Image (cartoon, rainbow, N blue to C red):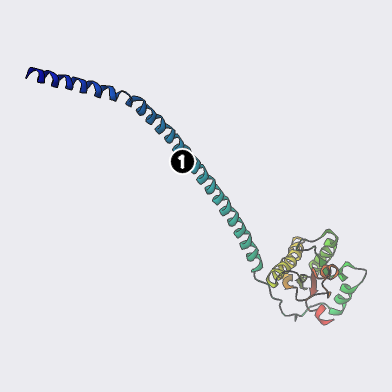
Amino acid sequence: MNKNLIGLCAALILAGCGGSAGQKPQAPVEQRDVTGQAKSDTAVQATTDAARAKQQQDEEARKRAAAAAAAAAAAESSRRAAADQPIVQPLPDARVIEKPLTDLASTLKDPASPLSKRNVYYDFDLYNIREEFQPIVEAHAKFLREHKDLRVRVEGNCDERGSREYNLALGQRRADSIKRAMTLLGVSPKQIETVSFGAEKPKALGSNEEAWAENRRSDIVYIGIDSQQ
């Protein structure tokens, strides 16, 4: 009986020692697991940072594209607004002028006078009055100031290039530039009316620079005088 009890105790003691010895190698394994987790967390953070940077770049690119699209839309809107502005229609030529028409017509046709020149020409796609044509505008403005019963119609014209709507708008700006210059020189706005013919009233036929240069112009027409010649 005692021998059996002693053998059982010895077996238990040996089993306990063996279990303790088997647990010792776990520490290095746990240490490796912690190190691997740290490396994994660092990789995840790097991936997250890269994704955020890419998202920010994409957002900035979208903002730049939206700004460019808005600028293009604004430019197109301005162009259309200019093309859609109302065109002034010419009034009837009939008007009673107190002074003899023959005398005024002779004055206006005198080759030695700048009044015989009725055309102002422009550079391509522009409507500002070139310096060489300013004396003509000034001469007609002075004549109109001296003859307040006279009226003129300034007709704006373009070459054949461009759409009908664009050319009508450009021709109107050309006619208005003459009127604005004359009113600044003291002519009553009531003496001047403007109209645009766009490319519908060419002075020269042809599709070349010579013809186009002739057609980019404003004509100064004396109402009640030029229509009777």
Query: Where 28 falls versus 209 (above or below)?
Result: above
Amino acid type, label 1: Thr
**Percent position (x, y) of residue 224?**
79, 79
Which residue is situated farthest in the right direction here?
A: 112
* Position in image of residue 178 (x %, y %): 76, 65
Count of marks, rendered view: 1
* Picture layout, residue 43 above or below residue 154: above
Hey, which quadrant is residue 222 in on the image?
bottom right
Q: Residue at x 47, y 40 (%)?
A: 47
> Is residue 228 among what the camera can see?
yes
Secondary structure under the numbered disc 1 in the rendered image: helix
Q: Is residue 225 visible?
A: no
Residue 70, by quadrant, is: bottom right
x, y percentage for residue 25? Answer: 33, 25
Nearer to us in this view, 55 or 150: 55
Report which quarter residue 188 is drawn in. bottom right
Left or right position of 112 against 46: right
Above or below, comparing residue 58 to residue 192 in the picture? above
Residue 81: give x, y in percent of width and height: 63, 65
At horizontal 74% and vertical 70% (from top left) the residue drawn is 192
Q: Nearer the viewer, residue 124 or 49?
A: 49
Give the residue number, with chain letter if any, for mark 1. 48
Q: Quadrant of the C terminus?
A: bottom right
Rendered residue at 81%/69% (across/down)? 212
